[in-house]
Image (cartoon, rainbow, N blue to C red):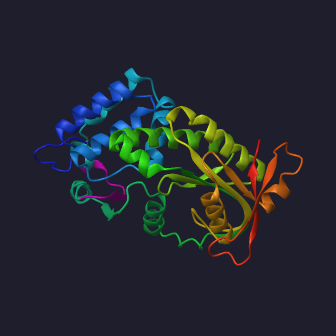
């Protein structure tokens, strides 16, 4: 993994050293993912961690190893060179690579084929290459329609806070916000879909869990000095691979945009479905939602 005169694709020694320092200092903490991402950005590393992974890296690292073991694994990882044994691998081999190292490694193996991937974190792209290489037929489009509850959240006044705090401090707050949101979504049996801009999009198989998740996210970020707004709607959505689409998704996003700071708005459908759950609401009036033909009655979550 480390640069050498005959292996220019390896990590620069400065990056290796500083990354080892990040592991030693931040492993297992909320700051770990942010510190790794900032180091990559500073040194111009040519691949970037997805924001949702950055937010989870601290928790994932705690589930993986203790800090001292992590430092040892990092050293072993960077000091191991397996090139001398690659010519002995005679089995047909598929190499997935996002830079020229793939062709180099293939040249050392007698029966290897290399495929380029655009995104090293895309499971879908990698699985497509693997299925094709193994001769499996392409899977039918994973398209289905199901009833689901969508939750959208958005940070209130994010641009003003960014200007006030500066890029570095704002990234730290966003990393903590995202990690805590992921924890609550997982705790309430939701499915994280996307983090567009300063917000979160998740789906749930029950509307009460979605509302309680929104309340929990708000409670978990009180110490960060930010406020969020949230919208919840239940309707039929279209599942296409990992994407979730449909009019219900647009309604949920529009409902969220109408909520005030620390406010949660829900549609009439959600209110009707959670009857008996213990959640209480107050009338928030009828509203015209962009792209939705009929006016919709909305309710504000009280508790």
Q: Is residue 87 above or below residue 234?
A: above
Q: Quadrant of residue 290?
A: bottom right
Q: How many marks?
A: 0
Residue farthest toward the right in the current orientation of the protein? 276
Q: Which residues are magenta?
A: 87-99
Q: Is residue 91 magenta?
A: yes
Residue 113 point in image, percent of width and height: 32, 63
Residue 291 point in image, percent of width and height: 63, 76
Residue farthest toward the bottom in the current orientation of the protein? 293
Q: In screen coordinates, is 243 left or right of 34? A: right
Q: In screen coordinates, is 236 left or right of 28? A: right
Q: Is residue 133 above or below residue 45?
A: below
**Residue shown at the point (22%, 44%) measured from the top left:** 43
Q: Is residue 20 above or below residue 199?
A: above
Residue 205 point in image, percent of width and height: 74, 54
Q: Quadrant of the C terminus?
A: top right
148 or 60: nearer the eye?
148
256 or 192: nearer the eye?
256
48 or 184: nearer the eye?
184
Whether residue 206 is visible? no
Residue farthest toward the left in the current orientation of the protein? 5
Q: Is residue 135 magenta?
A: no
Q: Quadrant of the N terminus?
A: top left
Residue 117 point in image, percent of width and height: 35, 62
Q: Is residue 215 above or below residue 143?
A: above
């Amino acid at each position: 993994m480390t640069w050498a005169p005959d292996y220019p694709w390896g990590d620069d020694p400065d990056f290796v050293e500083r990354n080892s320092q990040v592991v030693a200092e931040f492993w297992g903490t909320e700051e770990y993912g942010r510190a790794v991402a900032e180091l990559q950005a500073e040194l111009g590393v040519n691949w970037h961690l997805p924001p949702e992974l950055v937010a989870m890296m601290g928790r994932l690292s705690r589930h993986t190893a203790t800090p001292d073991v992590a430092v040892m694994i990092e050293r072993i990882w960077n000091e191991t060179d397996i090139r001398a044994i690659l010519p002995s691998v005679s089995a047909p081999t598929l190499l997935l690579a996002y830079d020229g190292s793939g062709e180099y490694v293939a040249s050392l193996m007698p029966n290897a084929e290399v495929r380029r991937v655009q995104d090293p974190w895309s499971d879908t792209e990698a699985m497509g290459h693997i299925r094709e290489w193994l001769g499996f037929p392409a899977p039918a489009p994973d398209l289905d329609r199901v009833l689901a509850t969508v939750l959208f959240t958005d940070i209130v006044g994010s641009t003003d806070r960014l200007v006030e705090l500066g890029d570095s401090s704002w990234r730290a707050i966003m990393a903590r916000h995202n990690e805590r949101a992921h924890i609550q979504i997982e705790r309430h049996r939701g499915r994280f879909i996307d983090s567009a801009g300063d917000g979160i999009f998740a789906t749930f198989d029950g509307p009460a869990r979605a509302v309680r998740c929104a309340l929990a996210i708000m409670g978990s970020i009180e110490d960060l000095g930010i406020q969020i707004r949230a919208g919840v709607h239940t309707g039929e959505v279209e599942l296409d691979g990992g994407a979730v689409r449909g009019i219900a998704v647009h309604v949920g996003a529009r409902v969220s945009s109408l909520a005030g700071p620390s406010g949660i708005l829900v549609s009439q459908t959600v209110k009707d479905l959670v009857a008996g759950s213990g959640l209480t609401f107050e009338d928030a009036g009828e509203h015209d939602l962009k792209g939705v033909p009929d006016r919709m009655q909305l309710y504000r979550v009280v508790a």
